[in-house]
Amino acid sequence: MPAPFKTEVIVLRSIRYGEADRILHLYSQDHGRLGAIAKGVRRVKSRLGGRLEPFARVNLILRQGRGDLCTVTGADTVHAHPALRERRASLERATQACDAVLRLLDSSDPNRPAYNLLAHELALLDADPDAAVRSQALAFRMKLLLAAGFAPELASCASCGEREHLGAFSAAAGGIVCPGCEAGSFPLGEEAHAFLVDALARPLAKYPSAGDRALGQADRAIGETLEHHAHVRLRRVA
Ligand SMILES: [Zn+2]
């Protein structure tokens, strides 16, 4: 039997399985994406069950199984994020954040920046009810793009390097573009451009704000970048 191993994880999703088990989609600090089965956790007496809810940050002991799934043999809560579960808006943003990680990061290679980003996002949503807004969700998604290696070019034209008159965005070109390179692009105003730059530059809790129109453009820029370069289609952030 393979030796058990320990890693810290965030529970992205939990699915009922069989009589009393759960299948867990996990993002781990040391092994990237992991799938695990937690046996008997839906029984009333299970000591593990309450620690393996979605959004929980947990130290797990796992044993490699025969297939793709590990088996959970121990769990110790790092942060359960109980407050965010009590607020519908926070819960929806947390679901969005975990879903984005689930879709974008499917490798077993560790990605510490992405792990830390998701941990900070859930802690922020838990601590601050006001953080459950569109601008914060987009700032998180922009930082996730960076952590996953897909951040768009924002400083100069992604096609020719021009530094002036940058008013459009092209995912195919890889970022903002100048009027001479704008084939296949869509307009990205100054406010949206500044939002994307600030979202990357500032800490997660100091997320920038912007008007609806600019946020819509920023959302489109992030979404098209994900589709073009990561081949992942996420629902737009409303
Ligand atoms: Zn250009």
Image (tube, helix red, strand yellow):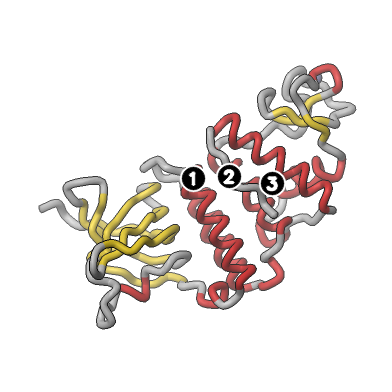
Q: Earlier in the sequence, mark 2 or mark 3?
A: 3
Residue 179 x, y percent position in the rendering: 86, 22
Distance CA(mark 2)–CA(mark 3): 19 Å
In which quadrant will I find the C terminus?
bottom right
Q: Relative to 229, is 22 above or below?
A: below
User: Where residue 234 is drawn, which disc sits there?
Assistant: 2
Q: Residues within 10 Å of mark 3 (few under 14, many from 20)?
A: many
Return the disc, 1 or 3, that comes first in the chain's sequence. Answer: 1
What is the distance, in whole Å, between disc 1 and disc 2 at their CAs? 8 Å
* For the residues bearing labels 2 and 3, Cβ distance under 8 angstroms: no
- Residue reaching furthest to the right: 165
* Location of residue 5 in the rendering, given as x and y in whole percent from the top left corner: 24, 56
**For disc 1, does the CB lie below 8 Å from ligand 1?**
no
In which quarter of the view is residue 232 placed?
top right
The reply to whether residue 216 is in sight is yes
Q: Is residue 203 above or below residue 52?
A: above
Spot the residue most to the left: 1
The answer to which image quadrant residue 137 occupies is bottom right
Whether label 3 lies within 8 Å of ligand 1 gets the answer no
Question: Where does the image place residue 187, in percent across and percent down from the top left?
Answer: 83, 33
227 horizontally vs 35: left or right: right
The quadrant of the picture showing ligand 1 is: top right
- SS label for mark 2: loop
* Residue position marked by numbered label 1 in the rendering: 103
Question: Which residue matches tag 3?
Answer: 200
Q: From the image, state whether disc 1 or disc 3 is nearer to you.
A: 1
Looking at the image, do the residues carrying marks 1 and 2 touch, with CB atoms under 8 Å apart?
Answer: yes
Q: CA distance from mark 1 to mark 3?
A: 21 Å
Q: Amino acid at mark 3?
A: Leu
Q: Does label 1 or label 2 sit earlier along the sequence? A: 1
Which residue is more in the foreground, 232 or 191?
232
Q: Amino acid at mark 2?
A: Leu
